[in-house]
Amino acid sequence: MFLIDSHCHLDSLDYSNKSIDDVLQQATCNEVRHCLSVATTLSGYQSMRDMLKPYQNQCSFSCGVHPLNLDDEVYDAQRFEALAQEQNVVALGETGLDYYYQQDNIEQQQFIFKEHIRLGRKLSKPIIVHTRNAKQDTLTILKQQHAYSGVLHCFTEDLNTAKQLLDLGFYISFSGIITFKNAETIREVAKFVPLDRILVETDSPYLAPVPYRGKENQPAYVREVANYLSILKGISLETLAQHTTNNFHQLFKYKGGE
């Protein structure tokens, strides 16, 4: 069995009492053989890349600017394009829209989101999309800008949104939220989404699944997400692992880890 954490932030974990080696070893012990580590700023991508350089067999990267990090640095389109073409960058983002925490820069959020989509088309790379309180604008922009391909990570929306994303050819990724008591709507969506479009993730260090809720999340815990999802779908963990791993390879054109 072979699981992949399709979305984590390895550079954001607390390393005061552990190392990256410890985190990745723990993941391996739980059959999590690969992690996609996702950037939230361009400078953050560069430092994350340098930090994880010795672990490139176990980690691939996504390069981009999170909608809640637009004030952290001046957006530089040329720099973004250069970094996005680096080795081991399999996706762009995470990008998208967040109207829950920020509504004073909606135009800027939409512009940067469109920039990710444009570059994704140019480089034939998928985008990793974050959306919160902005599902209609997110869907509209994805459709109007003809997104090349991508995934809505940490899915928390409704069935109608899932259906529109699937119609666009997008994948849907489920996190530890699916194990939370109040996540029945998300569980219903998970039952609906076809096996060839599902990914699993931790979004670590955030959103640890039950029974680790309230603790720092880590890639090893994607096994808990996958196990819970397999029960929802009425299939074995091994079957779910095979599908989600194949989907990761398909979406991100990732060739390693076979």
Image (cartoon, rainbow, N blue to C red):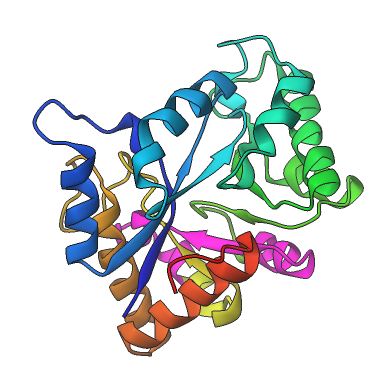
- Nearer to us in this view, 103 or 14: 14
Quarter of the image holding residue 85?
A: top right
Q: Is residue 245 visible?
A: yes
Residue 251 percent coordinates (x, y): 64, 64
The quadrant of the image that shows the C terminus is bottom left
Residue at image coords 79%, 53%: 124
Q: Quadrant of residue 42?
A: top right
Question: Residue 166: within the magenta?
Answer: yes
For the N terminus, the quadrant is bottom left
Check the image and report above or below for 27 versus 97. Answer: below
Vertical position of residue 149 compared to residue 134: above or below: below
Quadrant of the rendered image containing residue 68: top right
> From the viewer's perspective, is 243 left or right of 160?
left
Image coordinates of residue 200 in percent, x first then y, are 43, 63
> Can residue 194 be seen?
no
Q: Which residues are magenta?
A: 160-187
Percent coordinates x, y for residue 26 in the rendering: 17, 55
Q: What residue is at 36 percent from the left and 69 percent from the top? A: 3
Left or right for 105, reference 245: right
Residue drawn at x 12%, y 36% is: 18
| For residue 57, above or below residue 55 | below
Q: Is residue 97 above or below residue 207?
A: above
Which residue is at the front of the view, 212 or 161?
Answer: 212
Decide which of 121, 146 is in the foreground and name it: 121
Residue 88 placement, left or right of 75: left
Q: Residue at x 23, y 40 (%)?
A: 20
Q: How many marks?
A: 0
Q: Position of residue 227 (x, y in %)?
A: 29, 74
